[in-house]
Amino acid sequence: MQLGHVALAGTIASFAPEITAAAGVPRVDAWSAESLAVVFFAHYLPNFDVIPIKLKWAPDRFHCSYSHSLLFALAVGLGLWPFSASWAVLATVSLLFHLVADSGSSVGLPLLLPFSRKRFSLYLWADTGHSGWFAFRSTYQQAWTWITEGGMFLVLAARCYQFGVWPFD
Amino acid sequence: MFEYRRTPYLGLFFAAVIGGVVIWLVEAPARPLTITQTVIFYVLSYLPGLGLAMLGDPLPGRLKAKYLKIDFYAPGTAPPAAGDPDRASGAASGARAQKGGTV
C-alpha cells in the first residue's frame, strides 16, 4: 500500500477517542494535533526502513523485515508507554494497521521475526520494490491496490462527513 | 493500463453502486449531503470502482503475474522499463513471500 497509508492513518486518527477509551488510557481527541502526529508518525514508522537502504547502510531486502513484525509494534508501544500511555496505544494500533494494510502485498510480512522468518501475504498485488517511480506506477497497474486504497479514501471521506470536516462542513 | 475499453466505464457503474451504498450508510437525515458533497463521494467511489472493474480486465492480471515472477529485492535488480517487466534482471519466481506461508 502506498498512498492508501495516508487515508488509513487519517482514519485511525479519527478513531483516537474510541481507541484510547477502549484501552482505558487518557482520552485523545479525534484529529487533534496530538492524535495526528502520533498516528501518522507510528503508521509510517515501518517504512522508514527505506532510509538505511537509501543511505546504502542496508540491502534492499531490509525493507519489510524487522520493522514489519509484531514484535516491532509491541516494542514501539512499550517504548512510548513511560511517556504517554495514550501515545503507546495509538502508536501500537497504527503500527498494527500498517501491517494489515501491507498484508496484501506479495512481498509478505515477517510477522513473527525474529522467531520465524516465515512471511505472510494475501497476494492481492505484486510488490515491485520499496521506492521509486517504477514501484509507484506498477503498484497502481494492479486492481486490488485501487480497491483497497481507494476504499480507504472513501472511508476517510465518510469520517470527514461524520465530523463535519471540510468539504463536508 | 486496460485491455478493454469498457473497463473505465464499468468503473463508473461500480462507483455509482459503491457511492450509493456508502451514502446510504453514512448520510444523516438531519444533515443531507449537498450536490457537491455527493459528487465528491461519487468521485472517491470511482477509485475502488475502477479496481473492481480492473478485476475483469486481463491486462492488470497479466502484469501482476509478470511482476510476481520478479524479485525486486534481489541485489542488482534494476527496475524494468516502464510497462516492460520482462526486462527486469531479477530471478524468476523470486517473490520473497513464496518462500513462506500465506494467511
Image (cartoon, coloured by chain):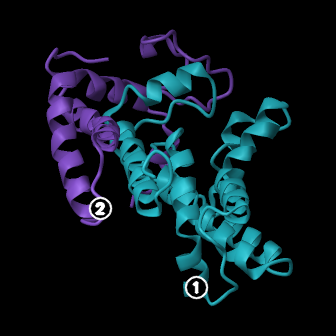
Q: Residue under label 1, please give it.
A: A21
Chain with colour cyan in the figure: A
Chain with colour purple in the figure: B
Question: In the figure, residue A40 lies in which quadrant?
Answer: bottom right
For residue A41, above or below residue B49:
below
The picture places residue A165, in percent across and down from the top left corner, at 50, 54
SS at mark 2? helix
The picture places residue B51, in percent across and down from the top left corner, at 28, 36
SS at mark 1? helix
Q: Residue under label 2, please give it.
A: B26
Left or right: A77 in relation to A158: right
Q: What whole-number distance in Å separates the C-alpha atoms at marks 2 and 1?
A: 23 Å
Res B32 label: none
Left or right: A24 in relation to B44: right
Question: In the figure, residue B50 lies in which quadrant?
Answer: top left
Disc 1 crowd, CA 10 A, few/some/many (<14, 14-19, 20+): some
For residue B68, above or below residue A33:
above
* Chain of the residue where label 1 is placed in the rendered structure: A
User: At label 1, which amino acid type do we have?
Assistant: Ala
For residue B49, above or below residue B57:
below
Q: Would residue B90 be visible to someone looking at this image?
A: no
* Chain of the residue where label 2 is placed in the rendered structure: B
Residue at figure coordinates x 68%, y 27% from the top left: B75
Disc 2 crowd, CA 10 A, few/some/many (<14, 14-19, 20+): few
The picture places residue A18, in percent across and down from the top left corner, at 53, 78
